[in-house]
């Protein structure tokens, strides 16, 4: 049964990722928005729905390591694994000035998370500040990225929304099947909650971003590929962790401030440095090697 869930989830992810990209491009043209803002806001936030569900359920169930590990691990995987694979399989990923600004915003949010983690808890006040920061980011992104009407024919709104909705449903259902199968196998193997949250659950809930970004990169839509990851990272830190902390304050085990959040911040800083020249295949290989190194480091006592 677990094997069927894994295979079925993978099939839905691949099909849904293609539908999401097609629908997002159509929606951007129809609304007169840039591909970057659609990637960051529509795809980035939409593909983060699994992280929101998992972190909320974990916090309410008294499993803070999974709640926080899911957010931190997902952000690290988004940059090192997903952008690494996207660059390796799809070629050069160009990063716009607006997306570079978004990367810097995400880095600042990550530093704030580290400060909260050093106190041992991400509390309700920190959660409210994060949600206010998310509202400010949305206002900035929508105002900055609107594109002027070039007079070209635009796709029908209904068609764009159907493609987007069908693609999103495919990746979310596929991700849920994969996560449930993977967590079941991991629990049977006796892994700790922190490790499951940082690896299996984090990568599993990032599968929508993986499917979408790779599909976008292979179709020459670099703005969607990068915007999807950057927007997802911001939403994870400000929206998901903010909402979770407001509902149920999240305890932060010492390992997060000592290892996992610093690794996430290092990945964000590397992405900011790479963004000026673009992310090519060699950089993609380096990002993937960095993720492999983090997985190895995680196992060191």
Image (spheres, helix red, strand yellow):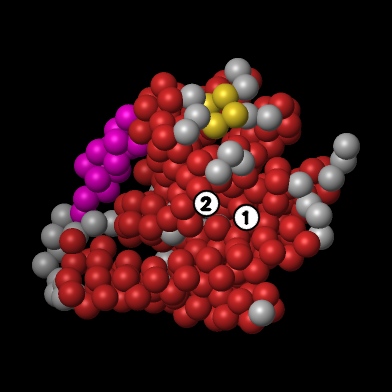
Tell me if residue 246 is in the magenta stretch: no
Query: Dividing the image into 4 quarters, which one contains the N terminus?
Result: bottom right
Q: Main secondary structure of the magenta part?
A: helix
> Could you tell me how far apart the alpha carbons at marks 2 and 1 are, in whole angstroms?
8 Å
Total marks placed: 2
The vertical placement of 233 against 31, above or below, is: above
Q: Picture coordinates of residue 25 (x, y %)?
A: 31, 68
* Quarter of the image where one finds residue 189: bottom right
**Residue 125 visible to an observer of this rendering:** yes
- Outermost residue, top side: 119
Instruction: Determine which residue is flagged by label 2.
Output: 54
Near-viewer residue (196 or 209): 196
Q: Residue at x 32, y 30 (%)?
A: 132
Instruction: Determine which residue is flagged by label 1.
Output: 201
In the rendering, which numbered label is found on residue 41? none
Near-viewer residue (11 or 59): 59
Q: Picture coordinates of residue 184 (x, y %)?
A: 69, 64
Q: Which residues are magenta?
A: 132-147
* Quarter of the image where one finds residue 186: bottom right
Horizontal side of residue 62 vs 228, given as left or right: right
Horizontal side of residue 137 vs 55, given as left or right: left
Query: Dividing the image into 4 quarters, which one contains the C terminus?
Result: top right
As helix, strand or loop, the secondary structure at mark 2 comes to helix
Q: Residue at x 62, y 29 (%)?
A: 252
- Outermost residue, left side: 151
Label 2 Cα crowd, 10 Å radius (few <14 / some 14-19 / many 20+): many
As helix, strand or loop, the secondary structure at mark 1 comes to helix
Q: Are marks 2 and 1 in contact (CB under 8 Å)?
A: yes
Horizontal side of residue 286 vs 212, given as left or right: right
Q: Picture coordinates of residue 231 (x, y %)?
A: 42, 48
């Amino acid at each position: 049964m677990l094997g069927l869930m894994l295979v079925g989830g993978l099939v839905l992810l691949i099909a849904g990722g293609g539908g999401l990209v097609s629908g997002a491009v159509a929606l951007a043209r129809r609304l007169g928005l840039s591909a970057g803002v659609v990637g960051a806001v529509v795809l980035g936030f939409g593909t983060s729905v699994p992280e929101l569900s998992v972190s909320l359920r974990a916090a309410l169930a008294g499993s803070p390591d999974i709640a926080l590990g899911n957010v931190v691990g997902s952000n690290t995987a988004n940059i090192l694994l997903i952008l690494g694979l996207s660059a390796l399989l799809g070629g050069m990923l160009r990063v716009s000035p607006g997306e570079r600004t978004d990367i810097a915003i995400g880095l600042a949010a990550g530093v704030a998370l580290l400060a909260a983690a050093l106190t041992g808890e991400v509390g309700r006040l920190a959660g409210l500040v994060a949600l206010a920061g998310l509202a400010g980011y949305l206002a900035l992104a929508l105002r900055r990225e609107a594109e002027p009407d070039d007079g070209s024919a635009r796709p029908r709104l209904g068609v764009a929304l159907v493609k987007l909705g069908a693609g999103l449903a495919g990746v979310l259902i596929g991700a849920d099947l994969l996560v449930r199968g993977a967590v079941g196998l991991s629990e049977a193997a006796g892994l700790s909650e922190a490790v499951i949250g940082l690896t299996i659950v984090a990568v599993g809930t990032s599968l929508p971003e993986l499917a979408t970004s790779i599909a976008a990169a292979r179709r020459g839509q670099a703005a969607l590929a990068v915007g999807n990851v950057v927007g997802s990272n911001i939403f994870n830190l400000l929206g998901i962790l903010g909402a979770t902390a407001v509902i149920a304050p999240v305890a932060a085990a010492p390992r997060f401030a000592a290892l996992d959040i610093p690794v996430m911040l290092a990945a964000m800083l590397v992405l900011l440095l790479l963004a000026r020249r673009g992310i090519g295949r060699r950089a993609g290989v380096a990002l993937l090697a960095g993720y492999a190194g983090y997985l190895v480091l995680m196992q060191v006592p």
